[in-house]
Amino acid sequence: MATIVAPPVHAARSSSSEIALVGRILIAAIFLLSGFGKVTQPAAMVAYISAVGLPFPKLALVASALVELGGGAALVLGYRTRAVAAVQALFCVATALTFHSDLADQNQFIHFFKNVAMAGGLMQVVAFGGGRLSLDARRRARLTA
């Protein structure tokens, strides 16, 4: 009969830390790409924002680009990870409700639930933080030293 041996605790922590980093990078990628698109094609985005009837479309463009680019970079680095993830989760839900609420349209249906799923993933980051491979962990280590 084979004996099952559990991996050392430090190995599990290391693996979890790497998984948290990869997860942050993967979820940040969509924000970074979208934010970059807003910066490189502002006229198209202002027209899209105006088409849904939001006031101050240029201000909305700047705010969303900051949330996406700044928040995406902060997620990758693990800087103020929980707060950033909370803001981005709210942003995802607001975007789903504002831009993708026609659920009879298959494309909007997919985008709506993509945003909801992203918000769910971000709430996991809110709950568990950025992990040991983050600027947050380095800051905590300095504060406790």
Image (cartoon, grey):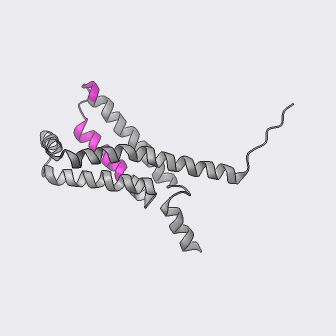
Residue 59 placement: quadrant: bottom left
Relative placement, left or right, of 44 versus 10 is: left
The image shows residue 140 at horizontal and vertical percentages of 53, 68
Relative placement, left or right, of 65 versus 24 is: left
Relative placement, left or right, of 70 versus 27 is: left
Q: Is residue 43 magenta?
A: no
Looking at this view, is 106 or 79 the one in front? Answer: 79
The image shows residue 30 at horizontal and vertical percentages of 36, 43
Q: Main secondary structure of the magenta part?
A: helix
Residue in the picture at 17% in, 47% down: 42
The image shows residue 50 at horizontal and vertical percentages of 12, 43
Residue in the picture at 45% in, 47% down: 25
Q: Which residues are magenta?
A: 87-107
Q: Which image quarter is the C terminus in?
A: bottom right
Exactly how many numbered labels are in the figure?
Answer: 0
Task: Name above or below for residue 98 compared with residue 61.
Answer: above
The image shows residue 104 at horizontal and vertical percentages of 25, 25
Task: Name above or below for residue 20 compared with residue 96.
Answer: below
Q: Which image quarter is the N terminus in?
A: top right
Residue 51 placement: quadrant: top left
Residue in the picture at 40% in, 53% down: 85
Residue in the picture at 15% in, 41% down: 44
Residue found farthest to the right: 1
